[in-house]
Amino acid sequence: MILPSVLRRSLTTILKWGLFLLLPLPLYISSSMLFPFITGRNFGFRIIIELLVVAWVGLLVLSQEYRPRLTPLVKAVILFLFVVTLADVLGANPYRSLWSNYERMEGWLALVHMVLFFLIMGTVFRRFFDWKLYIYGSTAVSIVVAFIGLSQKLGLTRSYQGGVRVDGTIGNPAYLASYLMFHVFFLLFFLWREKQTWLRWLAGAAIIFELFIIYLTATRGVVLAMLAVAGLLAVYFAFRQPKERRETVLKRIAITVLFLGIVLMGSFFAFRNAKFVRENPVLTRFATISTEERTVQSRFLIWQMAWHGVKERPILGWGQENFYLVFNKYFNPKLWSSEPWFDRSHNVFLDWMIHAGFVGLAAYLAMLFFGLRNVWQALRGQRIAFYEAGILGGLFMVYFFQNLFVFDNFQSYFLLFLTLGFTDYLAGANAVPPGELQKPNGQPSKAARVWVAVSVSGVLALFALYFLNLRPIFASQEIIQGLGEANRGASIASIRPHFENAIAYQTFGSGEAREQLATLVRNIVGSPRGGSPEEVKKFVEFATGELRRLVSGPAPDAKHLLFLGSIYNSSVALDPTYGREALNVLQRALQLSPTKQQIYFELTSTYLALGNLDAALEAIEKAAQLDPSFPNAHLNAAVVAIVAGKREVGERELAAYRSLVPKLDETTIQRLIDAYVRVNDFRSIKSLLEEGIRTFPDSAELYGRYAAALSTLGDKEGAKTAARKAGALNPELQNAVDQFIKDLDSGQAPK
């Protein structure tokens, strides 16, 4: 029989190595699944944690010394989990709160796994060296990620999100900045007590390098938070009376940092409009910070919407992942220029008030408070130096301030719970009693109980592995394969089975499959590659049937109803009854989100398809009235009014559009021409085309349409001149121009 002491060493070794397997996850990009920067590393994290729980349970049964100590921080973490669980169960959509979706991979399951990660760390990392090695391991991975970010800046690899901002393997510049920020502070912490000179120099170089990459992310929230906290720490260190030589050096460094910071900030402010700043895309993002900026304005609007949601359910909130309900209900029409759909308020504290009310926010802040309290206790107990306490306090402050403008993600949650666990160790929670780990356990019978516990938890882990992870993974892969077939131009017969298989797994991925299906079917309808009309109609019926299931559940999303209505509108040619179906679902969508312009736009299309011009005009005018600064709403209203024969309304809406967009582009001109053609208003067409030609004198297409309009109005010579100009601008049109002129000369209606 294996002795308990041997079993204990084996289990702790398994747990430690298993925890180290988590560190490379930020490098993992799962291209075979949806949202490759999110799904793969989250599933990987969950699978590893679930397997580690098997060994952890055995260790808990084997020795009481390894059971989590109920420190104030551990109690706060458990209380936080309890409050969020209660909020999710009593929330608007418990299923979504439990599972989340592929795009976020958060929700209750993610939080449970993070709490288990926190508890397991506290069980097995019992020496300072354990924590130091683990954090150094995480830092080593962060340096690799940072080098990938540098390669993107140098053009050696492509930034995954595109643009000038680097994102490493994290997939989002803001997430990358937050991820590197934690490691900068980790390195700053360990610098103080690192005795090996080469490691201090290496850590210093890594700090400078990662700060440079943070700058290249152009993430204003993180950078400004770090600058503010750096200033506070510099003041803290500069005014402290040195007690040893290192503190004297630190004081000089702090004074230098303060001086350089003031000079650099003053210089940047003075030269923020200089050419070298304006031509630098990173510096421009900082130079243009203003409360009037579109991004800042959208944040303020979203926060106002979130606050309305908080006031409606202030105690336990709406449950995790249910911000979409608040977004729909309290949508501010002024957000038309931003992303069409938000599932976060872009403020962690507002997010937790939405997720779990004021009680949940208090529980979340309690974790941070007790983490900081641990730092204070470690300082008072002389387990850390004042410099180390300042660095850890600074880390918490930066995390707090950056969260005013962003939301957490897998990387930040992982590093937050790692930091919390480390502070609990520093406060003395996991200090190893002298000789405790060497004590032999003289109870061989415990080994049998351990094997029983491991066997039972192993069976449960296998169950969780399959149902919580593998099935959603398989579903995600089916969706990707279906989308891949569609991108390659495959037939419906090749595409449909993948979505059927994804939905058949009956996981939280079914919702994502249906949502992706909605986008796909709208592209296929009317496409010659889609298949025969019968095949396309069957595919539409399949897609609409699945979307109806999606919106028939609790707390439906107005977005999904809009998608369903759009499918019906695009498929009216296949079945005229779809127009009535579209009307029904879009009216439901309006009940959920009465101020969302996109719904009115789609509803207008429905009324036009049904031939109800008055209702179409009423709907589109309502969209324009929601926010008079929305140009396209006025343009759409003008087009509908022209078609409906409401000339006065059309001119008024077109004037409103021109006041916002003085210069008409070619696409807008074509839209207006098509509307005027439907009511045979060729004089307005002539006027529009003359304006367009003045603006775009090299447009052969405009000259061609101008020739057609003049021909209709009886100006043959003008039509010939315009046609010849079109041919001169585009020689490929010359044969058509010759035929046009020939038809004019023969008295036939030109084609």
Image (cartoon, rainbow, N blue to C red):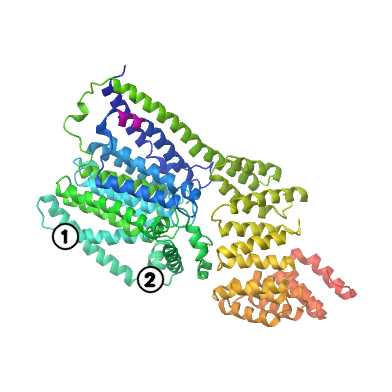
Q: Residues within 10 Å of mark 2 (few under 14, many from 20)?
A: few
Give the SS element for disc 2.
loop
Q: Does the rendering let one see residue 320? A: yes
Q: Is residue 487 above or below residue 636?
A: above
Question: Majority secondary structure of the magenta segment?
Answer: helix
The verdict on residue 578 being magenta is no
**Residue for point 35% across, 45% down:** 143
Question: In the depicted view, which residue is nearer to us: 55 or 530?
Answer: 55
Q: Residue furthest top?
A: 1
Q: Is residue 334 above or below residue 554?
A: below
Question: In the depicted view, which residue is nearer to us: 339 or 559?
Answer: 559
Of badges 2 and 1, nearer the viewer stands 1
Q: Is residue 337 above or below residue 432?
A: below
Question: In the depicted view, which residue is nearer to us: 749 or 734?
Answer: 749
Horizontal relation, residue 230 to residue 748: left or right: left
Horizontal relation, residue 391 to residue 303: left or right: left
Which picture quadrant has residue 67?
Answer: top left
Question: In the depicted view, which residue is nearer to us: 98 or 47?
Answer: 98
Image mark for residue 274: 2
Horizontal relation, residue 273 to residue 196: left or right: right
The x, y position of residue 445, in whole percent, is 29, 20
Q: Does the rendering let one see residue 150? A: no
- Residue identifier under label 1: 238
Give the SS element for disc 1.
helix
Image mark for residue 440: none
Q: Quadrant of the N terminus?
A: top left
Disc on the earlier residue, 2 or 1: 1
Disc 2 residue type? Ala
Magenta-tinted stretch = 55-61
